[in-house]
Image (spheres, rainbow, N blue to C red):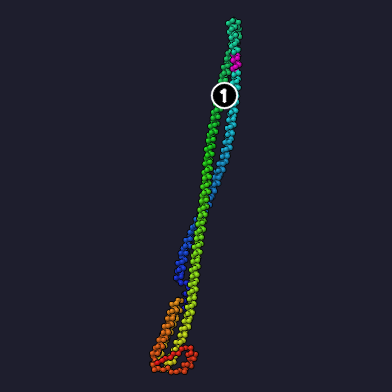
Amino acid sequence: MRYEARQRILSPQPSDQKQLLKVLRPLQLFLQSEHSKNEALVADREYLLKLIELRNEQWARHVSLLQSRIEHMKTQEVKMKTSNAAMLELLVDMKERIASSYKEYAELAETDLEDASTCIAALGHEIKALKGKLINAETLRLTGTYDSTEIKDLKLELKKLKHGYKALKSEKEAKIAEKENQIEALIAEKDFVRNQFKIMEAEYVAAVKLKNSDLDKSNEEVKMLKKNLQAMEASILEKDSIITAIKEEMAASISEKNDAISQLKDKLQTSNLKKDDMISRLNGEIENLKIILKEKDQMISGLHTDIANSAAHAGPICKPADSRTSRTLRSGTKRSRECESVSCAQPSTSKSVSGQRQHSTRSQGSASASTAETRILFSSSFKVPKLKNATTTSGTKTNSRPRLFFYG
């Protein structure tokens, strides 16, 4: 019984378990929620990192593509510049050649004009000479001293000269027309070349503008990509700071909960120690009560023997009183044993001690009541005889036990 009671006391009480469950249940729910939040944040962080890696790869590819396009555009621009320089050189050469040809044509025209003027001048001199001869011939014909053959020769020469003059004039006009045609063709060619040059210049300017716009767009895209990268890095840093703050909060909350758990454990240990101390103290009190009960039992047994001896010497009148007193004494011993069993079965509290004391007082009261009954049973004229055997047989017991003296 004692072992079972002690195990019952040492085992954790359901009220303590309920308190622990009340304290630990919200802590468990809080930790589970924080763990789920941390897992969600870690998953978001991994997703963001993967997304950033993919975006970085895409942006790197896009940047490499733009760089290749820029390099291609630069090479095309260099080629355009070289081709334009070559075209300009060709145009300059053509213009120089045209100018030189114009100069040559002008020089040739001047020489042709000089030749034509010299021919005309020579023809004019010849015509003048022929006219002078004709005049002389006419004067001779009038005078009758002319030669018909000479006149005929002069007329033939005049005809030839006129025909030659007309041929030279027509040839000169043809050359002038040819030169004019050549000049017009050169002017048309010059205009065509100038128009082509203007068209090429306009195309080159448009191509340069287009390339510059493409370069501006690519630069803007690169700037936007850099801004997006910076924004993503800032968001990653913010997420990392949030995660670190949440981890710190979790660590602080876990430390607080651990402190609370340690405090609860300390309280439980102190309560267990108090219970153990109380149990040991109550066990000592129970042992003391047992010793007292044993002493009382010994006293009651001694009284019983004394009463029996006195009843044996007194005669039959004392027998009923002896039976009644024995009954009362037995009931008192039974009650004392019952209170002893009850005190061992009850939990270790101050109420059990007070109850045991009350039971002990009751047992003492019952014993006093039994003595009162014995006093009432004997008559007032009854005198206790002196017993030598009782003093010798009891020995040391009578010395250690109190004697009862009945007065009439």
Q: Residue at x 46, y 65 (%)?
A: 25
Q: Is residue 71 magenta?
A: no
Q: Position of residue 16 (x, y in %)?
A: 46, 70
Task: Tell me where residue 119 sits by quadrant.
Answer: top right
Q: Is residue 326 above or below residue 229?
A: below
The secondary structure that most of the magenta stretch takes on is helix
Q: Residue at x 60, y 24 (%)?
A: 107
Q: Position of residue 330 (x, y in %)?
A: 42, 86
Q: In the image, what residue type sits under mark 1?
A: Lys
Residue closest to the eye, 337 or 178: 337
Q: Is residue 240 above or below residue 278?
A: above
Q: Describe residue 285's horizontal placement relative to residue 159 as left or right.
A: left
Q: Is residue 123 above or below residue 306?
A: above
Q: Describe residue 181's horizontal placement relative to residue 313 as left or right.
A: right
Circle 1 residue? 179
- Magenta stretch: give its range: 119-127
